Image (cartoon, helix red, strand yellow):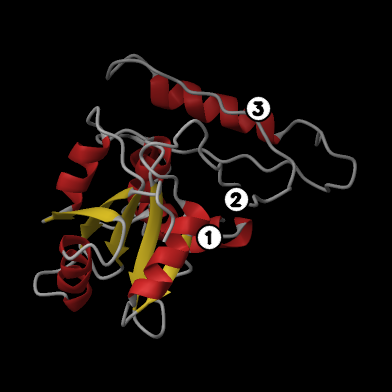
C-alpha cells in the first residue's frame, strides 16, 4: 500500500447489497486506503457530486434505480471516476455509456484497490483528471433549425414549410442519393401529429431520449 494514497469513494446500490457492507468494513478497518460514503439513492449521489467536496470515485450498483448515462456523465464532470458493480453477466455495456470500469460481484479488496489505482486520483493528487473518450458515429452531420414561438403564432406551419423546402434541395454530400430531413416535434402540446394526421406515434421523442440514456443506438436504430 502506498503511503500517500487516499481515496474518497461514494457508493450506491439497492438496500442490503452485500458489497456495500463489505466495502464499508474494509474502509473502517483500514484494510483499504479509502473513505467510503454510502448513499441511499442516485439523487443523493448527484447532490454530493454537486457539492464543493471532491471525490475520487463513485461505485454504482447496476441494479440501482435511476442509473443511466446522465449519472455517469455527472460524475465525470465532477472529476469523479464512475465504476459500475455488475453481476456475472452485465445488463448493459457500461463502458460504452461512460463508465471507467466495471467490477463483477463478489467484489474483493484486491480488485477494488486495483481499479481505484488505475482510474481514480487520490484526494490530495487531483491536479489532473483523466478524460474519457467515446467513439461516435462518423457519418456526415447536418444542421439543426429550431422554430420557436407561442401557441397560435404559426410555429408548427413554419416548421413544416422549412422541412419541406430543405427536403427538396440537392444533397450536400456527393455520394448521397437523397436529402434526409427530420421534422421533430419537441413540444409537450404540439400540433405536428394533428397537421400530418398521424395520431399517436410510438416510439416517439420520449422513447428516443430514454434509449440514449442507457445505450448508444446506431443511426439505423434512431431512424
The image quarter in which residue 207 lies: bottom left
Give neighbour class at mark 1: few <14, some 14-19, many 20+ (Cα, 10 Å): some
Real-space Cα distance between discs 3 and 2?
A: 35 Å
Query: Is residue 91 in view from this perspective?
Result: no
- Report the front residue among 182 and 222: 222
Q: Residue furthest bottom?
A: 88
Residue shown at the point (14%, 54%) measured from the top left: 39
Give whichever of discs 3 and 2 has the lower sequence position.
Answer: 2
Task: State the residue position of label 2.
Answer: 134
Label 1 near label 2: C-beta < 8 Å? yes
How many numbered badges does the structure rendering display? 3
Q: Residue furthest right?
A: 174
Residue 209 sits above or below residue 115 on the image: above
SS category of the residue bearing label 1: helix
Label 1 near label 3: C-beta < 8 Å? no
Q: Position of residue 142 (x, y in %)?
A: 67, 34
Q: Which quadrant of the rendered structure holds the N terminus?
A: bottom left
Give neighbour class at mark 2: few <14, some 14-19, many 20+ (Cα, 10 Å): few
| Residue 125 as seen in the image, left or right of residue 135 | left
Real-space Cα distance between discs 2 and 1?
A: 7 Å
Residue 90 sits above or below residue 177 on the image: below
Task: State the residue position of label 1.
Answer: 96
SS category of the residue bearing label 3: helix
Residue 165 tag number: 3
The image quarter in which residue 161 lies: top right
Q: Position of residue 105 (x, y in %)?
A: 33, 80
Tell which tag, 3 or 2, sits nearer the viewer.
2
- Report the front residue among 25 and 83: 25
Q: Residue furthest front?
A: 3
Amino acid at each position: 500500500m502506498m503511503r500517500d494514497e487516499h481515496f474518497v469513494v461514494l457508493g450506491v446500490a439497492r438496500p442490503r447489497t452485500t458489497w456495500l457492507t463489505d466495502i464499508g468494513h474494509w474502509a473502517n478497518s483500514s484494510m483499504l486506503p479509502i473513505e467510503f460514503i454510502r448513499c441511499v439513492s442516485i439523487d443523493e449521489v448527484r447532490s454530493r457530486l454537486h457539492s464543493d467536496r471532491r471525490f475520487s470515485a463513485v461505485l454504482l450498483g447496476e441494479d440501482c434505480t435511476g442509473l443511466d448515462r446522465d449519472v455517469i456523465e455527472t460524475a465525470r464532470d465532477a472529476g469523479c471516476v464512475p465504476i459500475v458493480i455488475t453481476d456475472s453477466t452485465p445488463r448493459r455495456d457500461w463502458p460504452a455509456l461512460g463508465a471507467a470500469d466495471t467490477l463483477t460481484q463478489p467484489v474483493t479488496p484486491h480488485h477494488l484497490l486495483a481499479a481505484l489505482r488505475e482510474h481514480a486520483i487520490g484526494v490530495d493528487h487531483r491536479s489532473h483528471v483523466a478524460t474519457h473518450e467515446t467513439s461516435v458515429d462518423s457519418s456526415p452531420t447536418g444542421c439543426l433549425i429550431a422554430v420557436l414561438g407561442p401557441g397560435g403564432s404559426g410555429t408548427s406551419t413554419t416548421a413544416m414549410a422549412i422541412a419541406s423546402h430543405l427536403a427538396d434541395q440537392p444533397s450536400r454530400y456527393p455520394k448521397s442519393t437523397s436529402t434526409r430531413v427530420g421534422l421533430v416535434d419537441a413540444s409537450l402540446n404540439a400540433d405536428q401529429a394533428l397537421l400530418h394526421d398521424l395520431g399517436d406515434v410510438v416510439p416517439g421523442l420520449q422513447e428516443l431520449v430514454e434509449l440514449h440514456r442507457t445505450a448508444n443506438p446506431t443511426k439505423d436504430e434512431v431512424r
